[in-house]
Image (cartoon, rainbow, N blue to C red):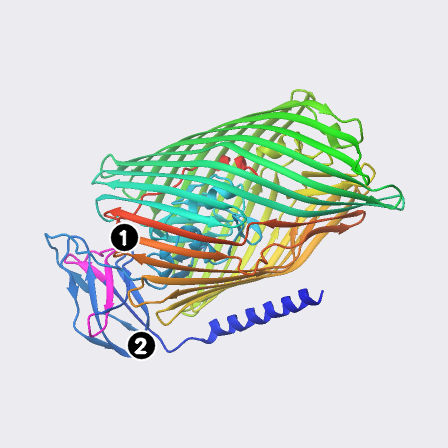
Amino acid sequence: MYFKTYSILNIRFLLIFLLLFSAFAKAQEYTLSGSVVDSNGTPVPFANVLLLNPDQEIIQGTITEDNGTFTLTGLDDAGYQLKVSFLGYKDYLSDAFTVFGDETFPQIVMDESSEGLEEVTVVGRKPTITRKADRIVFNVENSILSSGNTLDILKRTPAVVVSQDNITVRNEAVTVYLNDRKVQLSPTELSSLLENLDGNAIKSIEVITNPPARYDAEGGSVLNINTSRAVATGYKGNINGRGTYSIFPKYNIGTSQYYKNDKLNLFFNYSFNPSKFSNQSDNLINYRNEGVTTTWNQDFERTSRTQAHNANFILDYQLSEKSELNFSAVGLLSPNIEQSTASTTSVISSSADAFFISTASDIDNDRNNIALDLQYKYTLENGQLSTNVHFTTFEREQLQSLTSDYRNENDDLFRTVRFTSDADQDIDIYTAQIDYEATIGEFAFETGAKAAFINSQSRIDFLNIDDEGNSGLDQAQSDNFLYDEKVFAGFFSLSRDWEKWSAKVGLRAEQTNSKGTSIVLEAENELDYLEFFPTAYLQYTISDNHRVGLDYSRRLSRPRYEDLNPFAIFLNENNFNVGNSGLQPSFSNRFNFNYTFKNEYFFDVYYRDNGENIVTLAQQDNVNQILRTERQNAVGSKSWGIDLNHAREIGNWLYVATYISLFHEEDTFVATQSGGVEFTNSVDGLYVYLGNSFTLDKKKTLTAEATIEYISEFIQGAYIQDDVFRLDIGLRKRLWDRRASLSVNFGDVFNRATALVSADYLNQDNSYFPRVETQFFRVGFRYNFGNFRLRDNDRAIDNSERERLKQGE
């Protein structure tokens, strides 16, 4: 207890010190802004803008925005020159000038040239944060953060929390988009995808806590990752490799190939991930029945081996000046996934002799996920029309064998439990969508319609059950489960900016028809509902330094397909997960007030009524000494909190990002193993993130990072997790004129990223301490070839229904 208290006090002291340092360690700095146009006065976007000192050395750099403007920050009282370059234009070099304060540079006019663009190195600008009426935009293009991968950037994005492959905003899972195209992968697969997407390809990340009507009503917050626009033709590619060393080693090798000409964009990416994972935990259950306490103490260890293949192909073809065709294909193949589990359980009772259980379980898995997407876009005089069709097929096969031996204190075998199971799941998804957007007078108008058809078939057969005692194997029911779903949706939204106001309203309607059928149980569950999802946003700019906003949205959470299967999946004969075909969709109402100070400090106060939210509950049967985990609809669920986001550049060598959140979470559910009474699990918590990115040399080829995360108690269904603390450090060196990069990272330096998770209420008393591979050492290398300064057309396939394909790892 002394050690824990001492450790927490030191952690809090360290956090306070670092936050104070980041808040006040800022010298007098000035801003220089300007614009770049051609000889006709047309803005020149994506031009390289370099700030030089009197010795013609590069101080910092940026690129112009879509409207040709640029901003350079962190300038001192000194003399400078500006150099501007872009393909098809002569280089521009200004006369020497001196900065005495915040200034606007005279408009720069670029003269056309028949020669190509000289090779120019853009050395990084400060990431910026922009608050819009319906989202926060984190602009990172050519910033210090671009030297990492996309997952690294997400970790530094305002309000985003990345923990053990899970990406959350305000304590709930997010939906990730690439270029407004939805990514539907499991948390681990998504993490792998983002780790292999170069940060140099990212223009901005949009954090949308209350998504507008154009987004599907299902899900919580949205993260939209925008990649940079291609500005030149040619070929580029890279090969990359990464080795991660923890309890077991893991490897990743991959390549990306990209080609562009005047009409055609081609992109291909492939990665192979041979990995071995360790998942250990210490589990404790106190079963109390009629004054007798029986304690089950278990050491659990699972070793997983995977050989995942990920491939992505994208083709963009410009049919004419006004029309474009896009085709995408994603293949995720994971053959021969092997999971070997070994556990030892001691059972000690106040009224019976102790005994011990040794359990061995082997699971063999094959998973295939293939998605095809075709989109057509046509540019109108004042808008755009787009159509999209999509197909996904998902297959999974799983074979499990389990044996448990029961021995007394004399090591005599007195009981053996055995069973095997054979399961598979097939899901096909078809979607069609049409969208139209236009400018009508002073209003921006969007509308669209979508249809989705889902067919799912799941089967499980339990074979060779050998159990003469009392256990949870009475839930081992062979079955076939069929699920069909149809969703028809339509939406519109209207927005306008005027004077100091910005407003946006929208409405989405979704008609859902679903039917779940258990063949063996001869049970059916049908749903038929039409729901409306309004959204509203209002923003007012009080002055240059003050801005306030209000927003609201209604959202939907549908059960995932795997949660609807009424099958039992066993960790052992006394601990199992079971599906719930009777799950109902839940609806949430979300309110948010925001205040922005100097476009640097972002405050949010939010309230979220999650309604009958779907929660995962593990409840112990004290009579039969069984732990049963299933998904249930909560009686009620609420969240509220206050967030602060702040980021700044200190000099030209340090970028600091801070995110602090005070929050309250509560779920009220029916405690089925406690007499069916209602119980409310709640927690008041604190989350702190401090990210530091360092530039260690003038050419900005050597960078370092150090991130600190702290989270106090947190809810996980019926459980509460104790506080955790994490420190990550890393170093990256760019080599051979930035053609290659070498990186090293040390994750969870103090091995404090996991904590005790416990449920202690009514007649429930169980806990576990996970010991997963959060602490690691990683070495990565990337080599670029061809014209590697081209921008990608990398993006993801769109289909919202694949969200519920996510499988537990």
Between 319 and 481, the one lying in front of the other is: 481
Image coords of residue 698 (percent x, y): 30, 68
Name which residue lies at 71% across and 37% down: 358
Viewer can see residue 140: no
Q: Amino acid at mark 2?
A: Asp
Between 491 and 698, the one lying in front of the other is: 698
Please state the extent of the stretch shown in magenta in the rendering. 36-56
- Image quarter where the C terminus lies is top right
Query: In the rendered image, which residue does mark 2 sit on?
Result: 76
Image coords of residue 493 (percent x, y): 44, 45
Query: Is residue 201 rendered to the left or right of residue 114?
Result: right
Q: Quadrant of residue 95?
A: bottom left
Instruction: Name the secondary structure under disc 2.
Output: loop
Q: Is residue 22 above or below residue 227?
A: below
Q: Quadrant of residue 108?
A: bottom left
Q: Quadrant of residue 391?
A: top left
Mark-to-mark CA distance, 1 and 2: 32 Å
The answer to whether the residues at label 1 and label 2 have Cβ atoms under 8 Å apart is no
Query: Is residue 263 rendered to the left or right of residue 402?
Result: left
Task: For label 2, count other residues whose C-alpha is less than 10 Å away and answer few (under 14), some (14-19) or many (20+).
Answer: some
